[in-house]
Image (spheres, grey):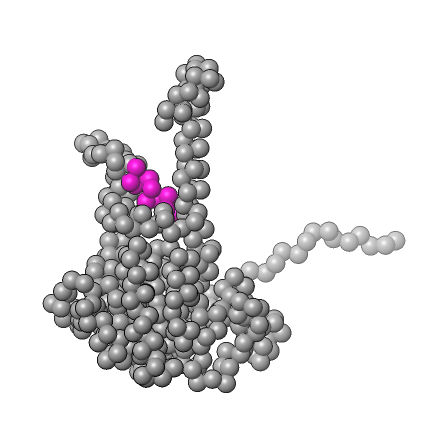
Amino acid sequence: MTPQTNNISTIPEGPVAGELEKLKQEEAHLASLLANLRQKKLNVLRSRPLTIGIIGFGRFGQFIAKSFTKYGDVIGTSRSDYTAIANDLGAKYIPLSELERFIMEENLDVIVVAVSIVSFEDTIKDLVPLLKKRIEVMGTGSCPLIVDVLSVKEHPRNILLELLPEECDILCTHPMFGPDSAKHGWQGQTFVYERTRIDKVLLDPSKDRTFHHKLDYESDGDDSRRTSFYDVSGLSHGIHENSDAHIEGMDRIERFLSIWEEEGCNMVSMSCKEHDSFTANSQFITHLMGRILGAQGLQATPIDTKGFQNVLKLVETTNADSFDLFYGLFKFNSHSMDTILKLKASMDDVVGKLLQKEGKNEDVANALKSCL
């Protein structure tokens, strides 16, 4: 007779005594290694400090300058006289009327263009002849990295690629915070960036394996494969390219990005096109609703709900920004009108359901909706 088998499954053994303590020790060891690695990064960053010029030394320019001065030299320029403020921040100040001096006499590694959306193109047009002069006088490798910080991304990207000399490396960024939302620090704030051009190579950020975190390599662990990225033509480029200019350009971008990383930002690599698609349904609609509700003159009452307090906060923060910023979010994001039309359609739909609930027939409801 075949013996009966026991169908009761074996109960897995629990953790071995002392295993949790071993895991804690391993966790502490990894934390120590991470802290040491971070310190080495800081030492590298501070051993070769960047000289960062900021064109547009208004409220936002001053806001970023305050952190930049921890890691390098900062030189601001603007239409108004911010000399005293720059001195308080530990920065240098040159009037915008002396832009040639700013470009030709200062040893700038990076230029951050922190002007409004509506004045961005004119600012770049003023900058271009001086950058060309700098390249002619000082050589090809003298052009600073050009960085934009606008709330829309395809617009400045197109302008920079169209107007700047090809010798200028380009980094398109959007710090998704400002002096109000990050008044206590940048920790946890989102910083979106696209490495656009380096050493005359136009990168393709739409590919999943493009540059830096997205280097081209297979899962077989072959480090020799981790050495390439793609340009917009689909051509693979070695990250060293046998070019000092290429290596220096990469290093400069990484050192600049490291400032934001060290300040605690959540770093998000994203194409300018994808960014604008997302922000039309997030940032623009937030500002749109804040402006619409602000136009109603809403006021706090003694019995406000938490929800209404949040509404008032939205109105306050969005209306604290200039109307030029709001207009720029609309004009220079190709997705903004679609967002407005969807909002209007949604409002018509909701109001229509209310009217139908009131017993209004469909024709009356539609007539009333058309008056909105």
Instruction: Name above or below for residue 40 compared with residue 112.
Output: below
Residue that sits furthest to the right in the current view: 1
Main secondary structure along the magenta-highlighted residues: helix
Which residue does the image show at 42% across and 20% down from the upper left? 367
**Between residues 361 and 80, which one lies in front from this camera angle?**
80
Instruction: Name above or below for residue 234 compared with residue 318.
Output: below
Which residue does the image show at 46% across and 68% down from the upper left? 23
Q: Quadrant of the C terminus?
A: top left
Residue 266 x %, y %: 38, 61
Residue 368 visible in the snapshot: yes
Residue 225 x %, y %: 58, 77
Total marks in image:
0
Residue 46 visible in the snapshot: no
Residue 102 x %, y %: 23, 74
**Between residues 46 and 326, which one lies in front from this camera angle?**
326
Which residue does the image show at 51% across and 66% down from the upper left? 204
**Between residues 252 and 371, which one lies in front from this camera angle?**
371
Task: Tell me: 200 left or right of 230.
Answer: left
**Between residues 110 and 357, which one lies in front from this camera angle?**
110
Task: Tell me: 273 left or right of 10.
Answer: left
Instruction: Name above or below for residue 140 compared with residue 53.
Output: below
Q: Which residues are magenta?
A: 282-292
Which residue does the image show at 29% across and 57% down from the upper left? 119
Is 162 part of what is drawn in magenta?
Answer: no
Is 283 part of what is drawn in magenta?
Answer: yes
Residue 142 x %, y %: 34, 81
